[in-house]
Amino acid sequence: MTYERGAMSIELATLDLLRAHTSVPVPAVDFADRTGELCDADYFFMPFVDADNLGIVGGTLTAAQRDAYMEQLGAFNREINSVRGKAFGLLAGPGDESWRRVFTGMVEDVLADGERRGFDIGWDYDTVRAALADHAGSLDEVTEPRLVEWDLWDSNVMVRDGRIVCVIDHERAFYGDPLIEACFTGTQMSDFGDPAPFLRGYGHGELTGTERVRRRLYCLHLMLIMVIETVYRGHTDTKQYDWARPRLDHAMALLGRTRR
């Protein structure tokens, strides 16, 4: 998809930022090669992380154990978001001073990807654009670019002996609004789990009215990706599409749009 470009460069740049400015545990980089001399792809080596994936073992944990991990993740996510950028958008630039322009452009890229494949998302594409435009003014409240992981789900968290020992997969990072982070999704869509432990660890109270509107726009963006990416992934079944499609309806309903 359009937004999935230069992923390894983003990952390496994000790792550098996190090691320099935070205490968030991230993998070391033993060697990286972007010359194209040995193979026609960028690559890097990192050490094996001797730990369990929280997304895999989460179902075997007690509620208290999982909550403790999510509180730790909230604290680490806040540290990540403490890193300031010079402009919104890609880490490599050129960036933009307007978060509204950057985010609406991100959504447009996803919509254009779907249109290019003639993919049925269950909604007229221009209706989705109109829902975004109706609420885009809420984005203007965001004036300071912050480093966001965006893809920081429990499946990108490695744990051992009650502690988070490594956060992996940083290839989708950019400078934006911290509320777009994955673990805030549950504040508006309960299908993504109870956000309370994460919020406690993050130190974030109840969302304001404008923050709720922004978070709903971010839910729309996420659900569009989860629906449209299925035509790009070559899935052999419709499981993800069938799960994501009604939740796209939910995201639209949160923005005042319902199917007739």
Image (spheres, rainbow, N blue to C red):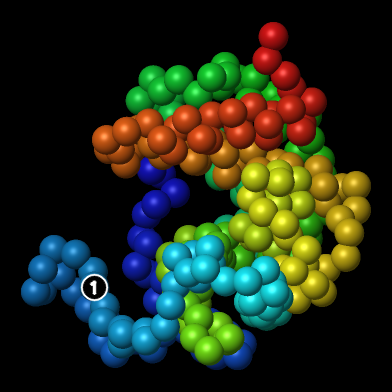
User: Could you tell me which quadrant the N terminus lies in?
Assistant: top left
Outermost residue on the left side: it is 38
Task: Please tell me which residue lies in front, 52 or 142.
Answer: 52
Task: Please tell me which residue lies in front, 196 or 15.
Answer: 196
Q: Is residue 86 above or below residue 250?
A: below
Q: Amino acid at mark 1?
A: Tyr
User: Could you tell me which quadrant the C terminus lies in?
Assistant: top right
Label 1, residues with CA under 10 Å away: few <14, some 14-19, many ≥20: some
Q: How many marks?
A: 1
Q: Residue at x 54, y 29 (%)?
A: 245
Q: Is residue 107 above or below residue 95?
A: above
Task: Please tell me which residue lies in front, 232 or 249.
Answer: 249
Residue 81: image location, x then y, percent: 67, 73
Tell me if residue 187 can be seen: yes
Residue 10: image location, x then y, percent: 43, 68
Residue 236: image location, x then y, percent: 27, 35
Q: Residue at x 82, y 47 (%)?
A: 212
Residue 219 placement: quadrant: top right
Circle 1 residue: 43
Q: Residue at x 68, y 15 (%)?
A: 259
| In-image side of 40 versus 191 (left or right) | left
Q: Residue at x 71, y 46 (%)?
A: 190
Task: Please tell me which residue lies in front, 190 or 47.
Answer: 190
Residue 255: image location, x then y, percent: 76, 31
Secondary element at tag 1 = strand
Residue 230 placement: quadrant: top left
Residue 105 placement: quadrant: top right
Outermost residue on the top side: it is 260
| In-image side of 169 versus 215 (left or right) | left
Tell me if residue 81 can be seen: no
